[in-house]
């Protein structure tokens, strides 16, 4: 009875080696665990192939032109779903599933074999007794009495269930033979893939990827600010929370910072969840909780240089909460600003005051009675929350779905519902406005938060309980000498 267990042990050992090789070697061979260039301008941790868009081929990330309209610098990257269509990637996924199936089958056989072996061990004394009696009766048939025959029959009836156990063993041996063939086939395929992939110098390729990533960020920095010309298709990162809320990453500190913050609801909320990475946020794991000393109003919060800036509930007071010290550093009233659903966006939700950040600093978007409900834009000093300068855009706030700042320009959507588009733009550098027609897909039909992150050049939105990203295309004009 020890031979089947030896076979099982050998197969399980092989299984462990294959699974270990799959989990450790294959990702590095195909580049799944390496640094990935962000194809659309979002954070590298988001662009891991988890949320493929519907775009095909290569797409423009950002373009710069000189005053004569000649192209100076264009950043392009492959659409994220190209890697997902790689046949080798798909084959590896299928092989991984097969390995998991074989592993589960092996566990079932192993459990059943252990149980049956224990039954055989328990029956061993009875087997020896019957075997001894049979040898005695064969050697001396006259010693077999009626009483002895009855006892032998009783012992045999006790051993009858052992027949089904032995039959199960026989079937398990056939199963093991089948699994052994599957493992052999898997080993052949994996060896072929390893030989194919091994033909490439992936360390060199990884260095090239890092170099291209450096060049990409260098080009992005040279491009600087620009005018919004397009918004990409939505990328759903997660579905969590209620219908209204906000989520964000820090708009200012270096790209090595990868924390994500989530604030569910718009009314009297105090709980802020801080996730270690974007990957943790998508999975809803590895987070800590901050309990704000003052509740918030609306969804127009922003994280800027390690602090959360938000509107205090039922007031026009702005609050700066520092995450590391878990304390309020500053409170200041935004003079004259309406609050408590006096001048909200079209969706309501106490969205009177919307704080945001772009490449040029910290901003507040709001309105007041003297401004007749038209959107005011004020640049704030993040250290004191004093208003540095203000602009009256002339656009009625109640007609706006949402708004965001890019490069000192306020962009306003005409609705928070399906069919929304970027309808209005006010440039604070020139104090001029224009009406625009930049469509975007409002996938879940109710946006209650839309903010631009200048560090990642992406729009973060809370759309009917879904956390969604949009990438943006900016048009740049580079001033040249002569």
Image (spheres, rainbow, N blue to C red):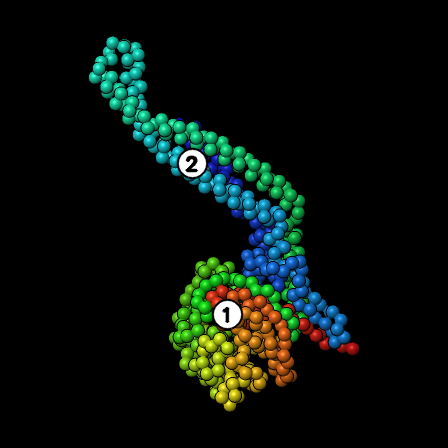
Which residue is at a point 29% across and 20% down the rendered structure image? 130
Compare residues 7 and 437 and report the one nearer the observer: 437
In which quadrant will I find the C terminus? bottom right
Secondary structure under the numbered disc 1 in the rendered image: loop
Q: Is residue 409 above or below residue 205?
A: below
Residue positioned most to the bottom: 370
Residue 459: x and y, percent?
A: 56, 69
Residue annotated with mark 2: 109
Which residue is at a point 55% across and 43% down the rendered structure image? 95
Q: Earlier in the sequence, mark 1 or mark 2?
A: 2
Residue annotated with mark 1: 446
Residue 62: x and y, percent?
A: 66, 68
Q: Is the residue under label 2 in contact with that under label 1 (CB below 8 Å)?
A: no
Residue 281: x and y, percent?
A: 48, 62
How many neighbours does mark 1 have within 10 angstroms: few (below 14), some (14-19), or many (20 or more)? many
Q: Is residue 428 above or below residue 129?
A: below
Q: Is residue 161 above or below residue 477?
A: above
Res. 360 visible in picture = no
Q: Which mark is residue 347?
A: none
Distance (Cα) linking label 1 and label 2: 52 Å
Q: Disc 1 vs disc 2: which is toward the camera?
A: 1
Res. 142 visible in picture = yes
Compare residues 307 and 474 and report the one nearer the observer: 474
Residue 471: x and y, percent?
A: 60, 66
Which residue is at a point 43% across and 30% down the rendered structure image? 171
């Amino acid at each position: 009875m020890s031979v089947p267990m030896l076979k099982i042990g050998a197969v399980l050992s092989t299984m462990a080696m294959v699974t270990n090789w799959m989990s450790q070697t294959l990702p590095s061979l195909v580049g799944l665990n390496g640094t990935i260039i962000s194809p659309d301008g979002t954070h590298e941790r988001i662009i891991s192939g988890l949320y493929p868009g519907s775009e095909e081929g290569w797409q423009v990330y950002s373009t710069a032109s000189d005053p004569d309209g000649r192209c100076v610098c264009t950043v392009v990257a492959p659409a994220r779903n190209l890697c997902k269509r790689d046949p080798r990637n798909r084959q590896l996924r299928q092989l991984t599933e097969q390995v998991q199936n074989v592993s589960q089958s092996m566990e079932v056989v192993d459990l059943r074999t252990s149980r049956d072996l224990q039954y055989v061990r328990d029956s061993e004394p009875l087997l020896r007794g019957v075997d001894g009696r049979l040898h005695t009766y064969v050697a001396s048939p006259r010693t077999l009495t009626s009483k002895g025959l009855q006892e032998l029959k009783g012992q045999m009836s006790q051993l009858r269930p052992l027949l089904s156990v032995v039959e199960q063993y026989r079937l398990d041996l056939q199963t093991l033979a089948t699994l052994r063939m599957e493992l052999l086939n898997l080993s052949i395929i994996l060896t072929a893939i390893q030989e194919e992939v091994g033909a490439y110098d992936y360390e060199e390729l990884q260095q090239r990827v890092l170099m291209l990533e450096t060049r990409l960020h260098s080009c992005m920095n040279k491009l600087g600010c620009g005018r919004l010309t397009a918004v990409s298709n939505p990328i759903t990162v997660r579905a969590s929370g209620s219908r209204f809320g906000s989520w964000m990453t820090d708009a200012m500190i270096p790209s090595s910072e990868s924390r994500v913050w989530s604030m569910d609801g718009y009314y009297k909320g105090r709980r802020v969840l801080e996730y270690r990475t974007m990957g943790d946020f998508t999975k809803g794991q590895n987070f800590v909780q901050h309990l704000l000393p003052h509740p918030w109003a609306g969804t127009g919060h922003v994280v800027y240089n390690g602090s959360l800036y938000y509107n205090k509930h039922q007031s026009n007071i702005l609050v700066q909460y520092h995450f590391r010290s878990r304390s309020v550093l500053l409170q200041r009233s935004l003079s004259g600003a309406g609050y408590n659903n006096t001048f909200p966006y079209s969706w309501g939700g106490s969205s009177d005051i919307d704080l945001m950040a772009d490449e040029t600093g910290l901003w507040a978007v709001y309105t007041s009675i003297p401004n007749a409900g038209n959107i005011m834009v004020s640049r704030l000093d993040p250290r004191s929350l004093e208003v540095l300068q203000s602009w009256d855009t002339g656009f009625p706030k109640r007609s706006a779905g949402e708004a965001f700042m890019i490069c000192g320009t306020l962009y306003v959507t005409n609705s928070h519902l399906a069919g929304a588009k970027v309808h209005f733009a006010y440039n604070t550098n020139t104090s001029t406005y224009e009406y625009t027609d930049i469509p975007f897909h409002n996938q879940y039909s109710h946006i209650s938060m839309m903010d631009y992150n200048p560090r990642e050049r992406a729009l973060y939105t809370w759309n009917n309980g879904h956390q969604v990203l949009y990438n943006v295309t900016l048009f740049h004009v580079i001033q040249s000498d002569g």
